[in-house]
Image (cartoon, helix red, strand yellow):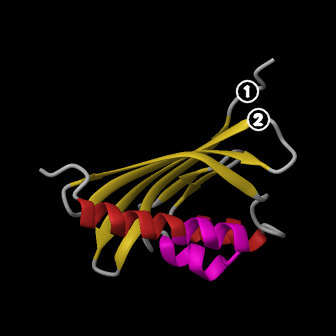
Amino acid sequence: MTINDPAVLAEVAAAFAAYEAALMANDVPALDALFWASPHVLRYGVGENLYGQDEIVAFRDARPGGSPQRVLTRTVITTFGRDYATANTEFKRAGFERVGRQSHAWARLPEGWRIVAAHVSMMADSH
């Protein structure tokens, strides 16, 4: 198995960048399209555990204004073969000192790269 094949890494990095752009623009249709359309997908958020596409879509539809704006501070993408990858990033939300963390598992599916599992958390205050 090839780790971080440059072509595959570029594909996943582009998918990750598309996700981040959609998140910051609150482009709900694009966000929904980047998640696996399956009852098996999951997203653990800062305050919610979402199982399946229906719960993830309902969460986004009910969230007024979308995600708080943020700046990514460190991102690590690793590909495993041609069809699986992880993308992990740290972020800072505007106006907050706490560090956030986001993890994605990505899989190449017939429709393209999709997030098959996601987790978002905030670290405890450092003082």
**What is the residue that sits farthest to the top in this orientation?**
127
Instruction: Residue at 44% x, 70% y: name it.
Output: 14
Asked if the stretch drawn in magenta spans residue 22, the answer is yes
Q: Report the residue marked by disc 1.
A: 124
Q: Looking at numbered disc 2 in the image, what kind of residue is underneath it?
A: Arg
Q: Quadrant of residue 113?
A: bottom left
Question: Counting other residues with Cα less than 10 Å from the Cα at mark 2, is it few (<14), some (14-19), or many (20 or more)?
Answer: some
Q: Give 53 or 127, whichever is nearer the viewer.
A: 127
Q: In this image, 35 relative to 123: left or right? A: left
Marked residue nearer the N-terminal end (2 or 1): 2
Residue 125 in picture, x, y percent from top left: 78, 25
Q: Which residue is found at the position 49% from the left and 69% from the top?
A: 35
Per the rendered image, the range of residues in magenta is 18-34
Asked whether the beta carbons under mark 2 and mark 1 sit within 8 Å of each other, the answer is yes
Q: Which residue is tagged 2?
A: 98
* Up-down relation of residue 1 to residue 11 (above or below): above
Main SS class of the magenta portion in the image = helix
- The quarter of the displayed image where residue 38 is located: bottom left
